[in-house]
Amino acid sequence: TWEHVQQAPPDPIIGVNDSYRADTDPRKLNLGVGAYRTEEGKPYVLRAVREAEAALAADPAANKEYLPIAGLPEFNRLSRELALGPSHPAIRDGRVATVQALSGTGALRVGAEFLAQHLPPGQPRVVYLPNPTWGNHKTIFGRAGMQVREYRYFDAKTRGLDFAGMCADLSAAPPGAVLLLHACAHNPTGVDPSPEQWRQLLALTQERKLLPFFDSAYQGFASGDLDADAASVRLFASAPGPQEMVLAQSFAKNMGLYGERAGALSVVCKSKEVAGRVESQLKLVIRPMYSNPPMHGAAIAARVMADPRLNALWKEELAGMAHRIKAMRQALYGQLVARQLPGDWSFVLKQIGMFSYTGLSKAQCEVLTRKWHIHLTMDGRISMAGLSAASCPYLAEAIADVVTN
Ligand code: LMR
């Protein structure tokens, strides 16, 4: 029956873990998948998470019943409040429909399925993604039945934002098209619009009647401040209108809950009545796929957000992780400059969030992996969170080798 099945290619991001595992060289370094590591190169479980887990385990009222189809209500409420701010008028008016999701990917997929089914009849099912974007975006929206188009985003010459190109492409988008935006710390480039550019993008979105769909995978992880990293989402949600938008949230990075798959999808609607109907349809997307979401990660996240002491501890640890990544940018930059490499490497300092987008070619990346045992995605993205003070000189030496030979 399955003799005809073709071998699928390895995932360009998750597949890097396999090549890393298979590498027996002691110098090997995994800078592929975006996952935080300590200075010792170890995965990090936040203390706030450990304490929340201990409290949950000790709670005699806890059980393993099914969650509702839409997930843990407390988690959903706290998630949307975290993104929009607790006193946001859209929340107060009850016009945000939120469902728990299998982290950011699950939120994007449920959102994409809902859009493919429920955009107004006669309206094109088109989503505009930045070029480049997180590789999974294209597959998620494409598999859900949306037509995928790209807008210009990264300027390889300046290693910054091609804002003029972005605006030109979005000005040509048909009304009603979905516009995917990275809320902060754009993956893979680490290049974000400035506050003024965000304002212009909002104006353009309204003028062209585009539907913003924010992917918020790094709130608090980029700057160390949960509110600062939500600025773009809040700007759009607060636009007069009332503004409609879609928001996918992940707690993988900012709470270190990668494998727990804790995330949320919110649809900001024009009224409470519409939000109720939207939620009913989101449940209809979820029920035939996986019935209802897993409890543990959402219960941890809800506890960390609700408990003032754990919340304060979380913010402290979050700032600590963001700080360590920034320190790695400084360290790598210093090492590169010390080697007097050709070109301007200050982008390492300027880029935001978990990744640095080096501009190294696929051939150079292949040498990094083959010769230097540095495992990264072939688009030249390196996870700064996987670096340590000890490994920075080695990476700089390897980069110097591939750019000068
Ligand atoms: C990444 O881009 O490395 C992360 O978002 C992890 C993933 O699922 O790809």
Image (cartoon, rainbow, N blue to C red):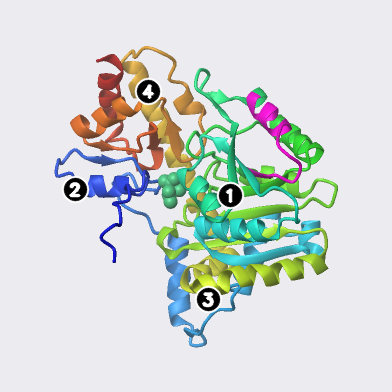
What residue range appears in magenta? 165-180
Relative to 20, residue 256 above or below = below
* Among the two numbered marks 2 and 1 on one chain, the one whose residue lies closer to the N terminus: 2
Question: Are discs 3 and 2 less than 8 Å apart at CB?
Answer: no
Where on the picture, by quarter, is residue 339?
A: top left
Helix, strand or loop at mark 3: loop
Q: Dividing the image into 4 quarters, which one contains the N terminus?
A: bottom left
* Residue designated by label 1: 216
* Among the two numbered marks 4 and 2 on one chain, the one whose residue lies closer to the N terminus: 2
Any magenta on residue 38?
A: no
The mark closer to the camera, 4 or 2, is 2
Q: Dividing the image into 4 quarters, which one contains the C terminus?
A: top left
Residue 162 shown left or right of residue 122 in the figure: left
Relative to 236, residue 373 above or below = above
Q: Position of residue 253 (x, y in %)?
A: 47, 52
Q: Position of residue 272 (x, y in %)?
A: 81, 67
Q: Residue at x 64, y 56 (%)?
A: 116
* Residue designated by label 2: 22
* Residue designated by label 4: 334
CA gap, disc 4 and disc 3: 51 Å
CA gap, disc 1 and disc 3: 24 Å
The mark closer to the camera, 1 or 4, is 1
Which numbered tag is attached to residue 291?
Answer: 3
CA gap, disc 3 and disc 2: 36 Å
Where on the picture, by quarter, is residue 19?
A: top left
CA gap, disc 2 and disc 1: 32 Å
Q: Name the residue nearer the viewer: 28 or 304.
A: 28
Helix, strand or loop at mark 1: strand
Relative to 39, residue 85 above or below = below
